[in-house]
Image (cartoon, rainbow, N blue to C red):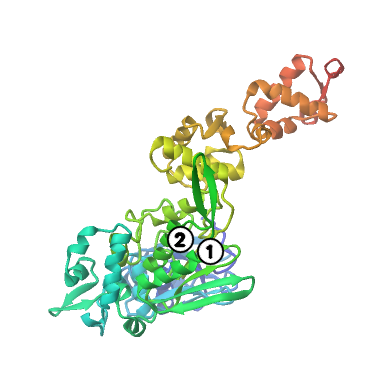
Amino acid sequence: MYQIIPPCETLEIEFKSDKGKLPDNDLIDAVVAFANTNGGDLYLGVEDDGRVTGLHPSHKDITQLAAFIANKTIPPVSVRVEMINAEEPVVMIHVPQSRSIVASSAGKIQRRRIKGDGTPENVPMYPFEINTRLSELSLLDFSAQPVPGAVYADFDPLERERLRRMILTYNGEKTLLELPDDELDKALQLAVTVNGQLVPTYAGLLLIGRQQKIRELMPTAEAAFQMLRGTEVSVNESFFLPLLAAAQRIMDFIDARNPEQEMEMGMYRMSIPEFDKRAVREAVINAFAHRDYTRLGRVLVQMDSDGLTVSNPGGFIEGVTYNNILTVEPHGRNPVLADALKRIGLAERSGRGVDRIYEGSLRYGRDFPDYSGSTAVSVKLFIPRGMPDKHIVRMIAEYQQKSGEPMPLVSLFVLNLLKENRRMNAEAINQGLNLPEAKLRATLERLTEAGLIEAMGSGRGRNYVLSAKMYLDPAEYVRQTDIDQIRYKELIMKLAEKKESITRKDVIELLHVAPPQAYRLLQKLVKEGRLALEGNKNGSRYTVKENESK
């Protein structure tokens, strides 16, 4: 089978020369590195610069080659080997990503990374990185592990009292308040029994540990807040504090710089903050709950004229990307820590805290939160500033008042997408949502029945626009809809009167209809004697007849 060889090496592509027979150890190391990263394709018989130089005879039996790789890796890696007929024979070895840590039979563990010049390399995976990789694969809960060298006395009674107050403030599990201190700690898995003694877990030390012990035993538990004015840093605070105290300090910084404006809603007034407080709290708590505590770094909250950025060390968990973050099944890097925060009441109990983050912007008609700045080693959330869209706010408030329940997140997405793009079909709407088609259709029908959006056309050509109540200027609404097909002919005639002649393409752009429909409308006007056809086929143009123009 002929297959084009990629032009260069990447994180998922590796070239290996085989002119003098690639050493077995080098081959196995390359496979192990792929399996411990993202998987990929190893091209055997290709030089680093992409030149094809061919296979050594000992590697031409692809069945034997696959068996050899499985025998030399632990656990065995099942690769797919294909012979490629390029200028010289080349073997492509497809290595799947492993759901566990893979080593060579000699005990060597490697991974792949990108160097500063953009080229890939294989490097050793060190012991601390093994924990990181296992947590990314959801195979290890670092926060549940007992802290070496810590004792039960390292808990701060004042921080435990803060925890109890937060359960009351944020409507957490009230039954936890009835427990004595040691039972509370065990119920939240803040401490576990080791050799008959209660020992703090990493989750426990983070939440209610003494400040000096956190700095000593968890040097990665740093947090910071920065306020930028242009290129000047007006606030730059970095601190090692128990998680609850750190989150509260960051929220105090933000609240002091989060102005509100009032909006009249009939007889009532609504205060609208620049950043939704629930959404910001969820973003900050998520950064603490899902960061990688095996990596050096800090939870950083940065505010500037463009918006609010919340970043934390550790990329997304395996299977999660910024494209599917709203639809993927929720699962975290530190389940015990995340569960404790949910039971306290600080985090969303359903595990869908990201929904609340998006809702905080969309219910005010602001721009979408953005995770696209995230990398393999950090998650970065940007919440943009922006004036609220009062029409969106009013429409959502009226809907919720009538229905007696909050507007679903998918509905908020649809309304805001239509606000930005004016007119969209179901396929275009779903590009940003990745929902099952049936669920999206149900949402669109529900919004149509509620009078929030309007549908035009039928079948795959059906488009959606916001309803008339969303437009302050009726003319803007008419320009966006043009849904009354009875007016199609008048709109075409007006365009033809403005221009010397029109084409089918002009009609398509004017009415947003398919080419066959545009053709049929023009032909009807010709038969009615209102337009005259000039030319034929691709050169056809239509002009207003003299009697019509008079």
- In which quadrant of the rendered image does the C terminus lie? top right
Task: Please tell me which of labels 1 and 2 falls first in the chain.
Answer: 2
Q: Quadrant of residue 5?
A: bottom right
Residue linked to disc 1: 308
The residue sitting at 55% across, 51% down in the picture is 366
Q: CA distance from mark 1 to mark 2?
A: 9 Å
Q: Is residue 493 above or below residue 172?
A: above
Residue linked to disc 2: 280
Q: In the displayed structure, does residue 190 sit left or right of residue 214?
A: left
> Camera-side residue: 452 or 391?
391
- Give, as a three-letter code, the residue at label 1: Leu
The residue sitting at 39% across, 64% down in the picture is 285
- Give, as a three-letter code, the residue at label 2: Val
Q: Secondary structure at mark 2?
A: helix
Q: How many marks?
A: 2
Examine the rendering and report whether any part of residue 21 can be seen: no
Image location of residue 20, percent across then percent down = 50, 79
Q: In the displayed structure, does residue 120 sit left or right of residue 493?
A: left
Mark 1 Cα within 10 Å, few/some/many (few <14, many 20+)?
some
- In the picture, the disc for residue 107 is none
Image location of residue 517, percent across then percent down = 65, 26
Image location of residue 29, percent across then percent down = 41, 76
Q: Secondary structure at mark 1?
A: strand
Circles 1 and 2 in contact, beta carbons < 8 Å: yes
Q: Is residue 361 above or below residue 286?
A: above
Image location of residue 402, percent across then percent down = 42, 35
Seen as rendered, the residue at the extreme left is 196
> Camera-side residue: 326 or 242?
242
Q: Quadrant of residue 154?
A: bottom left
